[in-house]
Amino acid sequence: MRETNGHDEWKAAIDKAQEMLEEGRREMARAAEMAKEKGEDAWKAAQKKSREAWDEVRASGLNAIDDIQDKGEEVWEDAERLVKKHPARVIGLTLLVGVVIGTLLGRDRD
C-alpha cells in the first residue's frame, strides 16, 4: 500500500472546491440573466404605462383647449349681439370702465 502525506486529499479537496466554484459561477450567470430579463420586462411595462398616461393627459388637454375655444367663441358672439342690440350702452359702459381703470392706474401709490 502506498503511503500518502495528505497531498492526494488536499488535491481532491481543491478539485472539489474548484468544481463548486464553477457551479456557483454558472448559477450566478443564470441568476444575472434572469434579473436582466425581469428588469427589461419591468422597464418595458413602465414605458408602456407612461406612454398611455401621456396619451391620456394629452387627449384631456386637447379636449380642454377645444372646450375653451368653444366657450370663447360663444362669449364673443354674445358680445357682438350685445353691441349690435345696444351700441350706445356699450360705448357708455366702455367709457366708464376706461375712466375707472385710468383713475386706478393714475392714483398716487404713496
Image (tube, helix red, strand yellow):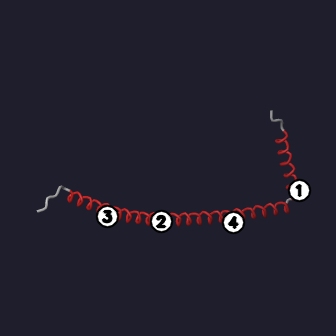
Q: Which of marks 4 and 1 is nearer the N terminus?
A: 4
Q: Distance between the residues labelled 3 and 1?
A: 96 Å
User: Eyeballing the image, is 110 above or below 94?
Assistant: above
Residue denoted by label 3: 23
Q: Which image quadrant: the C terminus? A: top right
Mark 4 vs mark 1: in front: 4
Residue 80 coordinates in the image, percent (x, y)? 82, 62
Mark 3 vs mark 4: in front: 3
User: Eyeballing the image, is 98 above or below 71?
Assistant: above
Residue appearing at x 85%, y 59% in the figure = 86
Query: Which label was assigned to residue 66?
Result: 4
Residue appearing at x 85%, y 48% in the figure = 98
Q: Which of marks 2 and 3 is nearer the N terminus?
A: 3
Q: How far apart are marks 1 and 2 (CA)?
A: 71 Å
Identity of the residue furthest to the top in this view:
110
Amino acid type, residue under disc 1 in the picture:
Ala
Left or right of 40 on screen, residue 92: right
Query: Which label was assigned to residue 88?
Result: 1
Amino acid type, residue under disc 2 in the picture:
Glu
Q: Which of marks 3 and 4 is nearer the N terminus?
A: 3
Query: Which label was assigned to residue 40?
Result: 2
Mark 1 vs mark 2: in front: 2
Residue 94 coordinates in the image, percent (x, y)? 85, 52
Q: Earlier in the sequence, mark 2 or mark 4?
A: 2
Q: How far apart are marks 4 and 1 (CA)?
A: 33 Å
Left or right of 84 on screen, residue 7: left
Amino acid type, residue under disc 3 in the picture:
Glu
